Image: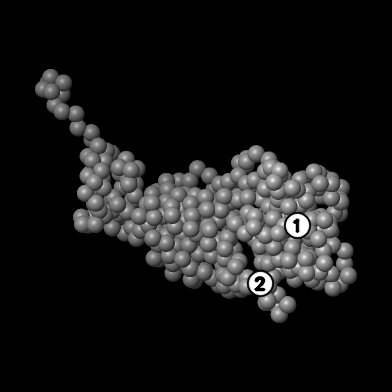
Amino acid sequence: MTDEEIHLPHVRKPVPSLTIYDVARTAGVSIASVSRVLNGHSTPRPETRDRVLRAVQELGFVPDGAARALSSRLKEVVSVVFRRPRAETQAADAEEFDDEADSLFFMDVLNRGIEVAAQLEGFDLLLSSVDVHEHSPGGKVAKLAGKSDGIILHDRVLTPNGVIRLADRIPVVTLAGTPTRASVNIVGDNVAGMRDLAKHVLGDHGYDSIAYLSGHGDSPDNLIRGKAVREVAEEFGLPFEDGPNWSGEYSAAGGARVIRRLIEEGRPIPRVICCANDQSALGVINELHRRGYRVPDDVAVTGFDDISVARHVSPSLTTVRQPIERLGALAFETLYTMISGERPAERQIVLPVQVVQRSSCGCRPETAPAVGAPSVR
């Protein structure tokens, strides 16, 4: 006699490969919510509990001992680690800049993006910093790994080998770092952004010399941006300057210090200064003004990031707009899928950026459009 002849109801057989992460996706809730329901916690809302139980029944999910153990081990915490800036602020800089606090702005926006995305999935953040000059941050990061389901590392926290070792223990996403075989890196399109910017100031404005004021020497973003400016200068056959004398360390104080030294040493200032980030560009503009130079009439200055202050300074800053908060949100979303047991499709995710023309390069801000359509490499 067949099943059809005795009219047995259709029952979906349990699928051994199903996990609590499949339940979370089907129910449209976070892994944390599934974990709480499976472990009998009283905290989930009734509608959340009902959605989870319906998903369990629909999938035929059987929470065996391993699944229950896995869900009970979920900490619902993600650690975020960044390097604390220590700008070399000299007496001449102290009155104008407080980079110890100000240079955290970019990271604050990134971290806000991470936090908002984490809250949507019921996760908390554990924020920690390591000193720029700390020789062995690995021990501190390893302790955080024991308290977290995954870790997001800002650039320069660990070496690529250190990231690989950490990723053998716990899911890892890096922001503006170096891609590895074991982690995922989230980054803005530094190459396209800086090339478009350099082409704009050299091609559209016709300036005849250019310099790159760099960030930290071990920053992957910094190295890529500097290389892009150099390549465009070579394509135009124009003089290009960079190197140790042009290190602004991503800070306003550092940018001002570079300009002060050049002027005091009697060295000529290039017609365009492309800075590694907006903050150092603001320091450059401030020091040029103090020394009697007009921006952009004597020297054009550009930045990178498009932090909020860039549009409010005088002259307003031409820059490359990064989707800063989205970078942070995507870092968590990617880490969340890794915590869920999914293998990432890509080891590096590149988000589009866009040149924003303002006064500091010589454009008229009321008519200047953005340069270049967003593109993803």
Q: Residue at x 23, y 33 (%)?
A: 12
On the image, the x and y values in percent for residue 298 come to 84, 58
Q: Residue at x 52, y 53 (%)?
A: 325
Real-space Cα separation, disc 1 to disc 2, in angstroms: 19 Å
Indicate the amino acid at tag 1.
Answer: Val
- Which type of secondary structure does the marked residue at label 1 adopt? strand
On the image, the x and y values in percent for residue 140 come to 48, 71
Query: Within 10 Å of the Cα at label 1, are there few (<14), some (14-19), or many (20+) other Cα atoms?
Result: many
On the image, the x and y values in percent for residue 256 come to 74, 68
| Res 119 quadrant in image | bottom left
On the image, the x and y values in percent for residue 289 come to 78, 66
Residue bearing mark 1: 301
Query: Within 10 Å of the Cα at label 2, are there few (<14), some (14-19), or many (20+) other Cα atoms?
Result: some
Compared across the picture, whether 288 is left or right of 50 comes to right
Q: Residue at x 53, y 62 (%)?
A: 108
Residue closest to the eye, 93 or 60: 93
Residue bearing mark 2: 97
Q: Is residue 277 above or below residue 128?
A: above
Q: Is residue 262 above or below residue 175?
A: below
Sequence-first disc among 1 and 2:
2
Q: Is residue 52 something one can see in this rendering?
A: yes
Compared across the picture, whether 203 is left or right of 20 comes to right
